[in-house]
Image (tube, rainbow, N blue to C red):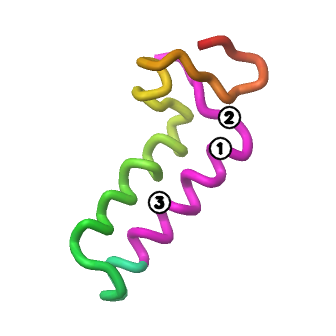
Amino acid sequence: MKANVGGIDRILRIVVGLALIAATLAGALPVWGWIGVVPLLTGLVSFCPVYSLIGVCTKKDGNA
């Protein structure tokens, strides 16, 4: 599992994930808001399985 999510991509994933989860907990979004767990986790571990499948790497020093 080689890191393929870097920099701004990682920060955006964490922020969006937390925002979706918070909005769901606050009642602003229905149960589908829990999908925010996915970008949150991929941001925290710096690895996106979909990026691996399509050959994308947003880390400056990495290759897909």
Amino acid type shown at disc 3: Gly
Label 2 Cα neighbours within 10 Å, binned few <14 / some 14-19 / many ≥20? some
Please, what secondary structure does the residue beneath circle 2 have? loop
Please, what secondary structure does the residue beneath circle 3 have? helix
| Residue 23 in picture, x, y percent from top left | 41, 79
Q: CA distance from mark 2 to mark 1?
A: 6 Å
Magenta-highlighted stretch: main secondary structure?
helix
Residue 19 among magenta residues: yes
Question: Which of the labelled discs sits on residue 9, or is there none?
Answer: 1
Amino acid type shown at disc 2: Gly
Residue furthest toward the top?
63
Extent of the magenta region:
1-22
- The residue at the point 66 percent across, 12 percent down is 63
* Relative to 14, residue 51 above or below: above
* Relative to 19, residue 35 above or below: above
Amino acid type shown at disc 1: Asp
Question: Which of the labelled discs sits on residue 17, or is there none?
Answer: 3
Residue furthest toward the bottom?
27
Q: Is residue 13 left or right of residue 31?
A: right
Q: Quadrant of residue 24?
A: bottom left
Name the residue carrying label 2. 6
Q: CA distance from mark 1 to mark 3?
A: 12 Å
Q: Quadrant of residue 56?
A: top right
